Amino acid sequence: MRALLSVWDKTGLLDFARGLESLEYELVASGGTARALAEAGIAHLDVAEVTGFPEMLDGRVKTLHPRIHGGILANRSEPTHLAALRAHDIAAIDLVVCNLYPFTSDPSIELIDVGGPTMVRAAAKNHHHVGVVTSPNQYGVVLEELRESGELSDATRHDLARAAFAHTAAYDAEIVTWMDRGGAIGPAPEARDEVVPVTLHLTLERADIVRYGENPHQIGARYRVAGTSPWWDAVVKHAGTALSYLNLFDADAAWRLVHELADDAPGLKAVAIIKHANASGAALADSLHDAFAKALEADPQSAFGGIVAVGGELDNELATLIAAGPQADVIIASSITDEAVATLVARRKATRLLSAPSPEPLGRSIRTFGNTALVQNADELLVPVSEWRCVTDVQPTSEQLRDLALAWRVCARTTSNAIVLARHGVAVGIGAGQQSRVVAAGIATTKAGDKAVGSAASSDAFFPFADGLDELTSAGVTSVVQPGGSVRDQEVIDAANAAGIVMMLTGERHFRH
């Protein structure tokens, strides 16, 4: 039995090679892999000894030779193939161990691997007879099966081949992405083409099977872009049933909102309660205990079955408060104490209790429907509060600006048409996902009730008519922030002045669908 080893990532290589050696495999190695084996005293043949031809072109040509690829590609069930091997004195290769240059670490012409993908694809094509190992994570499984059975099963070789083709596909996608960005000699792309290149090549690898999709009759899974480690990979589930598609979707929205709120207000603690990707309540306070109490008070009815996101450690005091409130489907925090876990599990065993790191930036957004995809960069709040423009006679107070900033942030993360009311650091009324902005305003003021008086309001897009603003001012709203840009802006501004309120324009719309 012969194994060909040529790896960039040498994690676990020596132990794996010794394992193969103990199973009486003859080892063949090239380049840095051969040097690593030699330094460890592991017997092997250098590729040059097999091919009778030295490495050349600074290592660009090592394994590209019939004595290597004939040994990999020979169909052992085809007599003419076996005869060709005998005629040319080529030994069959039964196992190819190869992973590729880390192109994304330092994209360059020299890190475009040629021999590696060729060996991997050749072995994967001939997987009826050859095993192909492309990750150190596979070493243990392969050795265990070889020790138990003396060979790899058809199923294992099939799975290894599938992983190998995925490995080379992801690698080629990285190279194309680099070329789209100009590569080594190409012109720098336009800013637009950085987000929406001519072709988009993504390799997604399944990270988790979720409990079900949006509904129990749907199958669902979480994928990650190959080669990345999204924040979800580091989430720890302390208790509760398996996560579903919507649990992940809503928890992601909640966790990102909490971090954005905290970033907007350094020194304050943030809590958000999310239902169907929209906040039912969000608050900033000096303590997480107070922030949760205020966020819950905003809309306790909608909080039932929602996601509670805690921007810090969830201790037993806060857990006791949460346990006394409406049932939560998911509770996510930076960390959770053992006492808090025990308290929450005693309240409801099914609630998923998650601790998580900070989320990475969203980056490119991709939505698919059928065979079509919509691609855009992430929606960021680009215009700071300091650059907002006051267009009314009444100027905002510092407290109004703080509440307007909170309302604006929550509104940007709420399904359109959206209106959000905030008062004293709490989102007290949220109208989400309405076809009419007037209706969204009515829902927000109704939910806020008496808390609408003296509140600050945000609209994710301009008011096309003054009727939406009138809905807010009649409920007692005293300041409003909106993008502006309507042909009737002056009519709306005049209505704001007539009501004696503050109106700020951002010049930046935040539709969310």
Image (cartoon, grey):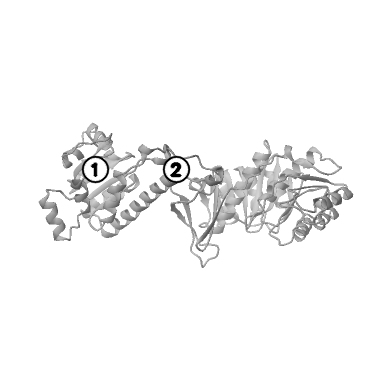
Question: Is residue 361 in view?
Answer: no
Q: Residues within 10 Å of mark 1 (few under 14, many from 20)?
A: many
Can you say whether 500 is above or below 351 in the image? above
Secondary structure category for the residue under label 1: loop
Q: Quadrant of residue 367?
A: bottom right
Can you say whether 435 is above or below 18 in the image? below
x, y (%) of residue 325?
A: 67, 54
Secondary structure category for the residue under label 2: helix
Q: Earlier in the sequence, mark 2 or mark 1?
A: 1
Q: Are marks 2 and 1 in contact (CB under 8 Å)?
A: no
**Which residue has dot 1 on it?**
63
Q: Quadrant of residue 55?
A: top left
Q: Residue at x 63, y 47 (%)?
A: 257
Residue 178 got which mark? 2
Question: Is residue 62 in view?
Answer: yes
Closer to the camera: disc 2 or disc 1? 2
x, y (%) of residue 266?
A: 67, 36
Quadrant housing the C terminus: bottom right
Residue 33 got which mark? none
Can you say whether 106 is above or below 331 in the image? above
**Tag 2: amino acid:** Trp
From this viewpoint, which residue is outermost toward the top? 39
x, y (%) of residue 436?
A: 74, 61
Q: Residue at x 38, y 51 (%)?
A: 169
